[in-house]
Image (cartoon, grey):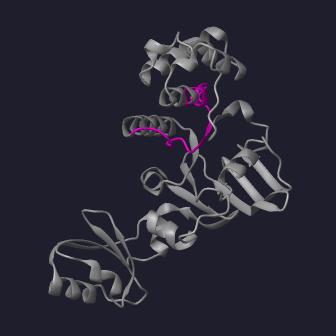
Amino acid sequence: MEPAVSLRDLVKTFGPHRAVDGISLEVTRGLIFGLIGPNGAGKTTTIRMILDIIRPDSGEVRVLGLPAGGARDKVGYLPEERGLYRKTKVLEMLEFQGAIKGASLAAARREAAGWLDRIGLGEWKDRKVEDLSKGMQQKVQFVGAVMGKPELLILDEPFAGLDPVNQNLFKDVMLDLNRAGATIVFSTHQMETAERLCREIALINRGRIVLGGPLAAVKSRFGKNSVLVEYDGDGDFLRSLPGVARVDDYGGYREVRLRDGADPQALLRALVERVAVRRFEIVEPTLHNIFIEQVGEKPADA
C-alpha cells in the first residue's frame, strides 16, 4: 500500500525566499504524523503543496496514491488561517461544506448536527457564525474539516488559541478518528503536544527536514543523557558544572542535558554536596529539548 502522503524533492520559492528547499518525506497510512518546526520554517507551505493549493517549483507530491489534487474528496483540511462565512448560520454552513464533499444536504445536516452536539455547540447550530467566540468558531471549522470521514486529515496548528478543555476535546476526536482508520497530519510548534500524539515526525527548519522518522527512534538517537532532578535548595550552580550542556527550568523540576561522555554520577555527587535531592532520573531527552538542539535559540526567518 502506498503511503498516505509521499513528497519527493519539493522546492518552493517566493521571490528571493526559498520557503521549501528539497523536502522529501513519507507519511505511513493509519498514523498520526507530526510536522513540527518553528514559525516560518516552511510547514504551512508544505501543507499547501500537499493539498494542491499551490504548486511546487519542482518535485513530486502524491496523496493516497494519486497525484496532488487527485484525492480532494478524501482529504479534510483545517487551515492555520481560520475563515468562516460570518453571516451564515452554523448548521447551514456545515451543510454546505458537507455537500461540496459529495453528501446530500440531509446527510450533511445529520452529520453536522451530530458533530455539533459532540463538541458542545448543539445549542448554537441556528446562530450566525459571527455570534460565536473565536474558540467556538475554531471548533466549527474543525467540524467542517472532519465531515465526510476523510481518509487523510490535515490540521495546521489545530491547538493554537484553544483553552486546555478544548485542546483535550480536539485530542480525543483526533484519536477516535485515527482509531477508525484516518491518517492525520498536523503541524505544530508545541512539542509537548507532538510528543504525546505522534508516532512519526518530521522536523522542518528553514525549509529543510533536519530530522524525522518514528518518534521513538528519533529520541533514541539522542541517547539517555538527560536527567530530571528535583531538589530543595539553590541550584543555580548547575549551569556552571563542566559536564552540563544546558538546563531547562520547569519550576518544580529541572531537566539537565549532559554533554557527550559526561558522567551522570558526577552530576549526582555535585547535587548531594549542595542541595537536598528528592528526584534524580536519567531519561531520554524531551522532544522540546531535541527541537532546541536542532533548531537553535533563534527562530527561522518569517
| Image position, residue 148 (x, y; %) | 61, 25
> Farthest left residue?
276
**Residue 88 versus residue 212 in the image, above or below:** above
Judge by depth and name the residue closer to the eye, 225 or 62: 225
- Which quarter of the image is occupied by the C terminus? bottom right
- Which residue appears at 28% of the width and 78% of the height? 236
Q: Is residue 189 left or right of residue 69?
A: left
* Residue 259 in view here: yes
Numbered range of the magenta stretch: 142-163
Q: Is residue 248 left or right of residue 293?
A: left
| Image position, residue 93 (x, y; %) | 63, 17
Judge by depth and name the residue closer to the eye, 59 or 233: 233
The reply to whether the magenta stretch includes residue 101 is: no
Which quadrant holds residue 176?
top left
The reply to whether the magenta stretch includes residue 143 is: yes
**Residue 176 versus residue 218 in the image, above or below:** above
Judge by depth and name the residue closer to the eye, 292 or 59: 292
